[in-house]
Image (cartoon, grey):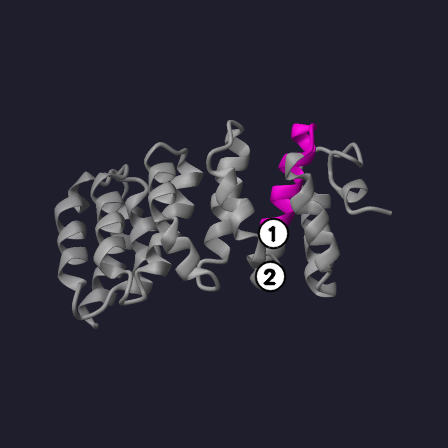
Amino acid sequence: MTVINQLSSSLGQKGNAANIALAKAIAEAENRNAIKELVENLKNKDKKIQADCIKTLYETAYIKPDLISEYYTEFLSLLSNKNNRLVWGGMIALATITDLKSKELFESIDLISNTVNKGSVITVDSGIEMFAKLNKYSEYQDKIENLLTDQLWKCPSKQLPQYMEKSTISINKRNKEIYKKIINERKAECEKESQVKRLDKVLKLIEKI
């Protein structure tokens, strides 16, 4: 039985329950042959199969990112795909393997950044996560920090708390003032008290650095 036959659409199921269960089984068995088959079928003629494959791949990577990391070039190629489901799915996959392939992803940062700038909310979410992870590395900070803070300045206010929370992994004594400034200047834009509280929590965390 091939992996493709176990995908949600192949089973005639709506939703992603089968894909998530398959991803868990692949991760537990460290089934690299299954990963290879899923990657190959990102080019399947059936868009439902394509969507199921990218979903299963990044769900597997949530558990064991090293299982998909060697296919980073395939995920990068998805960023230029006409199918938006594959674009944001590719971004999620790349975000899960950023720490494993930081050098390779930094080399493609212009493609990634351009995709973020014109992407959907999910694409931007994953882009912010990727930028924050790359910004932990001193050799990338000169370029990455500008990309990250640019997104924090211009993102919708309702997304700001989430993005600031993602960014904390790369905030240190050297750069903390810029993140404090972003929060202090944009906090008034937030319409919900819960958003303000989340930003205040990040601010307190930054103050302790």
Kindly identify which numbered label has been placed on residue 189: none
The residue shown at (35%, 48%) is: 109
Looking at the rendered structure, the kind of residue marked 2 is: Ile
**Residue 88 coordinates in the image, percent (x, y):** 48, 39
- Element at badge 2? helix
Q: Which residues are drawn in magenta? A: 44-59
Image position of 16 with respect to 138: above or below: above
**Callout 2 environment at 10 Å: few (<14), some (14 to 19), or many (20+)?**
some
Which one is nearer the viewer's eye here, 120 or 72?
72
Kindly identify which numbered label has been placed on residue 63: 2
Screen quadrant of the C terminus: bottom left
- Element at badge 1? helix
The residue shown at (15%, 56%) is: 178
Q: Overall secondary structure of the magenta stretch?
A: helix
Kindly identify which numbered label has been placed on residue 59: 1
Which residue sits furthest right?
A: 1
**Residue 21 appears in the figure:** no
Horizontal arrangement in the rendering, residue 107 relative to residue 182 (left or right)? right
The residue shown at (17%, 44%) is: 186
**Residue 206 coordinates in the image, percent (x, y):** 21, 65
Q: CA distance from mark 2 to mark 1?
A: 7 Å
Looking at the rendered structure, the kind of residue marked 1 is: Glu
**Residue 99 coordinates in the image, percent (x, y):** 44, 63
Question: Is residue 150 highlighted in magenta?
Answer: no
Residues at badges 2 and 1 in contact (C-beta under 8 Å)?
Answer: yes
